[in-house]
Amino acid sequence: MKKILFPTDFSEVATNAFVHALEFAKIVQGELILLHSYDLPVFDEQFFHENFKEIYDSLELLQFDLFKDEIPKLRTIADGHHLGKIKMTHRLMGGDLTSNIKKAIQEDEIDFVVMGTSGATDWDAFFVGSKSGSVIMGIDVPMLCIPLGAKHKKIKTIGYRTRFKDEDKIALKKVLNIAKKTNANVKCLYVKTQYSDISKDTIEKWEKEFEQEPIAFFVVTGDEIKDIVLDFVLEKKIDVLTMLTYKRGVFADIFKPRFAVNNTPNFEIPILEIPVD
């Protein structure tokens, strides 16, 4: 059974993402591990030496009470979506969010992370300014990021940005496994810029290899990668966009200034991040 880590602070953003996490667990036949991570205050022991432990103990108790009160609400949400049979366990951890996620991934042998993001209408904030943006580059398992405006719906089309590299093929097969479980189609986009080094022969070999799969390949020529990707999402009615995480700078650059333009539509869809070694 796949293990899915769901970090939550019990906010509106996290609660919205929880429904996606439940549905994703159903798709991959997995269980959820709910993680509530809270910051630990930094005190100068010179002034708080005697009460140091008491302060931390009281903070932990306060967070435990919050955790205890919120868990039944999440179970009610699960029951309301007829997903109450999804197995759920819980972790309460003090300290840095990213560090706690990494620790939980290792200790619980996590396969996926599902996490809400507050960058609801601005993908630059989505990947750079939100909590999930700070986590993306720090973990080595696939991560499904859910913006607040992304209401759950049946996944019919999964978008996948490829560079026709070996690592892309490995990730694409993972995406195919998910697509088959939800009867979705996969639409792959290759942006051919002036610096592209992929031959027509390579593309044809990929098409031949995957011709029996529910995949369609699209090659678009241009140097405005971010605009091409976003137009692709709109035109092909993508429900989930999948991308490989190479390094933060390259990834974040795809989602910049366009959103300051008037009448720009919102792109509130889940993003599945697959890390590359």
Image: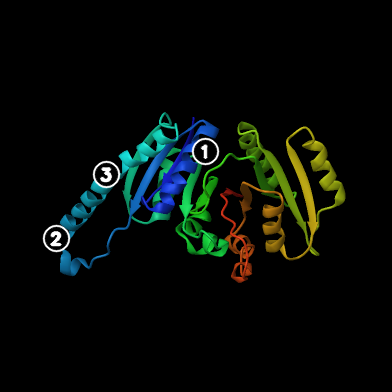
Measure the C-alpha gap from mark 3 to mark 1: 25 Å
Residue occupying image coordinates x 64% and y 37%:
179
> Relative to 224, is 205 above or below?
above
> Relative to 165, is 22 above or below?
above
Q: Which residue is mark 2?
A: 51
Q: Nearer the viewer, residue 107 or 150?
A: 150
Which amino acid type is marked by label 3? Asp
The residue positioned farthest toward the front in the image shown = 263
Specify few, some or many for label 1: CA neighbours under 10 Å numbering under 14, 14-19, or 20 or more.
many
Tag in front: 2 or 1: 1
Which amino acid type is marked by label 1? Phe
> Relative to 119, is 74 above or below?
above
Residue 61 in the image, given as x and y percentages of width and height: 21, 49
Q: Which mark is residue 24?
A: 1
Residue occupying image coordinates x 43% and y 53%:
13
**Callout 2 touching callout 1 (CB < 8 Å):** no
Which amino acid type is marked by label 2? Asn
Residue occupying image coordinates x 60% and y 67%:
259
Residue 110 in the image, given as x and y percentages of width and height: 47, 40
